């Protein structure tokens, strides 16, 4: 019996990236649906949960993606609401690669800190996007004092509040619209994780070269201009200016391996739910 993955994307066109990784992760057939919302997903979930015999249900799974984190979270909730008793299949949420990218980056930071992240201060630059939001949760789970920056105070505060409420963690919001403000935001920090939009430089090299407290830096942006000047996108725990740094492709290999591994796990049982905490836990077993 074939392994079937139903790709429910909140964007009008389903992600090709997610489709390719789904195949590479072990799905035999990946069916992409775009424009999926809580209002129209019900019948699709019914089709997934009512068709196969109990012993074969683990060979059907659902992937929720799209560029909007909040829309993805709402869709995941709607999917799970349709499940009851034994009528359920495994499901994974990874809007814009949020969970797998953040988990790969934070797992590497945890590894580079030799497991001792607790008590440190991390600033997630442009942390209002999907990757930054999930990185905030994962770092907070490690006992890190987390702040996210954004260009507007309102958006940063709203994002921090939503993350804090959903995951029961503390996240500080800092308005930082330019390099000078971000320099101020990272004062006293040990960790900087840049999760800004592709092609946007957030911090210049002078801001971290002589920095007295910084120990670890990571940049998720693989599209020039990179998010943190002075980090090469291939850097993987490379020492620069006395700090250990990671570029987007440096930790990106783990991201892809993790994403594939998660897809593979969906077909091992009927009731797996992979979101922030579960995906981070898997990443920690794969890093290094
Ligand atoms: P995103 O939503 O596109 O952007 C994140 C934040 O960047 C936005 O919320 C916005 O924050 C800020 N931003 C946008 N334009 C800006 C500008 N011109 N100047 C300053 N800030 C700006 O990003 P994402 O989906 O979370 O992804 C984060 C990064 O990870 C991206 O660079 C993406 O390409 C990368 N990525 C890497 C991998 C990998 O394996 N390495 C995988 C997936 C994604 P404010 O509006 O609040 O300022």
Image (cartoon, rainbow, N blue to C red):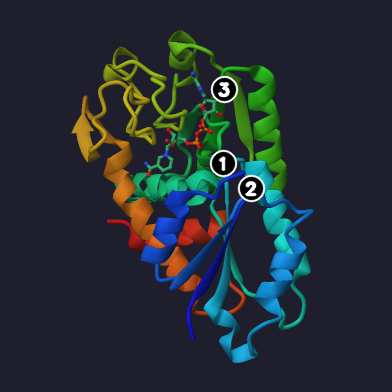
Q: Residues within 10 Å of mark 1 (few under 14, many from 20)?
A: some
Question: Above or below — where is 183 with respect to 260?
Answer: above
Question: Above or below — where is 59 with respect to 247?
Answer: below
Q: Is residue 183 visible?
A: yes
Q: Quadrant of residue 149?
A: top right
Q: Residue 85 placed where, x, y %?
A: 76, 81
Mark nearer the N terminus (3 vs 2): 2
Secondary structure type for disc 1: loop
Q: Residue under circle 1?
A: 67
Residue plotted at (39% across, 62% down): 260
Q: Residue 288 placed where, x, y %?
A: 27, 56
In the rendered structure, the answer to whether residue 187 lies left or right of residue 155 reads: left
Q: Nearer the viewer, residue 133 or 260?
A: 260
Mark nearer the N terminus (1 vs 3): 1
Report the Cα–Cα distance between label 3 and label 2. Answer: 24 Å
Report the Cα–Cα distance between label 2 and label 1. Answer: 7 Å
**Label 3 residue near ligand 1, CB within 8 Å:** yes
Tag nearer the camera, 1 or 3: 1
Q: Quadrant of residue 218?
A: top left
Mark nearer the N terminus (2 vs 1): 2
Q: Residue 57 placed where, x, y %?
A: 60, 82
Question: Above or below — where is 215 with respect to 153?
Answer: below
Q: Nearer the viewer, residue 18 or 258?
A: 18
Marks 2 & 1, CB-CB < 8 Å contact: yes
Q: Is residue 142 visible?
A: no
In the rendered structure, the answer to whether residue 238 lies left or right of residue 77 reads: left
Q: Residue under circle 2?
A: 10
Residue plotted at (44% across, 71% down): 27
Q: Residue under circle 3?
A: 150
Q: Residues within 10 Å of mark 2 (few under 14, many from 20)?
A: many
Secondary structure type for disc 2: loop
**Label 1 residue near ligand 1, CB within 8 Å:** yes
């Amino acid at each position: 019996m074939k392994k079937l993955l139903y790709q429910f994307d909140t964007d009008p066109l389903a992600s090709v990236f997610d489709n390719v990784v789904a195949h590479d992760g072990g799905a035999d057939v990946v069916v992409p649906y775009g424009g999926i919302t809580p209002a129209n997903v019900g019948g699709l979930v019914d089709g997934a949960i009512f068709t196969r015999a109990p012993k074969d249900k683990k060979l059907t799974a659902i992937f929720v993606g799209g560029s909007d984190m909040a829309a993805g979270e709402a869709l995941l909730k709607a999917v799970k609401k349709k499940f009851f008793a034994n009528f359920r299949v495994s499901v994974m949420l990874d809007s814009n690669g949020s969970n797998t990218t953040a988990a790969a980056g934070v797992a590497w930071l945890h590894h580079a800190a030799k497991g001792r992240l607790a008590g440190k201060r991390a600033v997630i630059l442009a942390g209002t996007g999907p990757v930054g939001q999930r990185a905030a949760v994962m770092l907070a789970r490690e006992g890190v004092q987390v702040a996210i920056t954004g260009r507007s105070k309102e958006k940063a505060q709203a994002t921090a509040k939503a993350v804090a409420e959903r995951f029961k963690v503390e996240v500080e919001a800092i308005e930082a619209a330019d390099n000078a403000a971000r320099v101020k935001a990272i004062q006293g920090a040990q960790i900087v994780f840049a999760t800004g939009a592709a092609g946007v430089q957030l911090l210049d090299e002078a801001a971290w070269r002589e920095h007295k407290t910084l120990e670890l830096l990571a940049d998720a942006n693989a599209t020039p201009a990179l998010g943190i000047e002075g980090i090469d996108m291939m850097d993987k725990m490379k020492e620069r200016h006395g700090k250990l740094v990671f570029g987007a492709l440096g930790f990106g290999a783990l991201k892809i391996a993790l994403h594939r591994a998660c897809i593979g796990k969906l077909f091992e049982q009927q009731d797996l739910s992979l979101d922030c905490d579960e995906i981070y836990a898997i990443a920690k077993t794969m890093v290094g």
